[in-house]
Image (cartoon, rainbow, N blue to C red):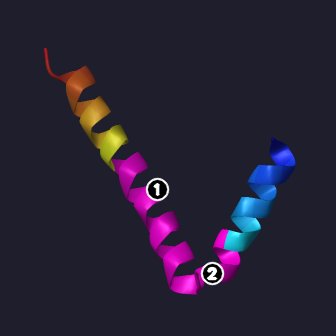
């Protein structure tokens, strides 16, 4: 399973260029930030 996933990831990286990778990283960062903000707000509100 691990080898197949690695091969798929390599093929994806070959197909997609740097902008797609940057977009993915930014998407993850934004998602984490939203989870932190919403989670923090939910914790603070009674």
Residue 41 among those drawn in magenta = no
Vertical order, 20 against 34 (above or below): below
Residue 31 among those drawn in magenta = yes
Mark 2: give few (<14), some (14-19) or many (20+) Cα within 10 Å: few
Q: Residue furthest top?
A: 46
Q: Residue furthest left?
A: 46
Q: Which residue is mark 1?
A: 28
Q: Quadrant of the N terminus?
A: top right
Mark 2–mark 1 Cα distance, whole angstroms, equals 20 Å
Where's residue 24, x and y in %?
A: 49, 66
Q: Quadrant of residue 46?
A: top left
Counting residues from the N terminus, which is met first, the one under dot 2 or under dot 1?
2
Vertical order, 17 against 5 (above or below): below
Magenta-highlighted residues: 12-33
Q: Which residue is mark 2?
A: 15
Q: Quadrant of residue 41?
A: top left
Seen at 25% across and 37% down, the residue is 38
Which of 3 and 35 lies nearest the eye of the viewer?
A: 3
Where's residue 20, x and y in %?
A: 50, 77
Vertical order, 40 against 1 (above or below): above
Where's residue 35, x and y in %?
A: 34, 40
Instruction: Give the secondary structure at mark 1.
Output: helix
Mark carried by residue 5: none
Where's residue 19, x and y in %?
A: 50, 84
Question: What kind of secondary structure does the magenta stretch mostly adopt?
Answer: helix
Mark 1: give few (<14), some (14-19) or many (20+) Cα within 10 Å: few
Q: Quadrant of residue 23?
A: bottom left
Seen at 42% across and 47% down, the residue is 32
């Amino acid at each position: 399973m691990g080898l197949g996933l690695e091969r798929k990831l390599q093929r994806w990286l070959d197909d997609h260029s740097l902008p797609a990778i940057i977009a993915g990283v930014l998407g993850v960062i934004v998602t984490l930030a939203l989870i932190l903000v919403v989670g923090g707000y939910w914790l603070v509100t009674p």
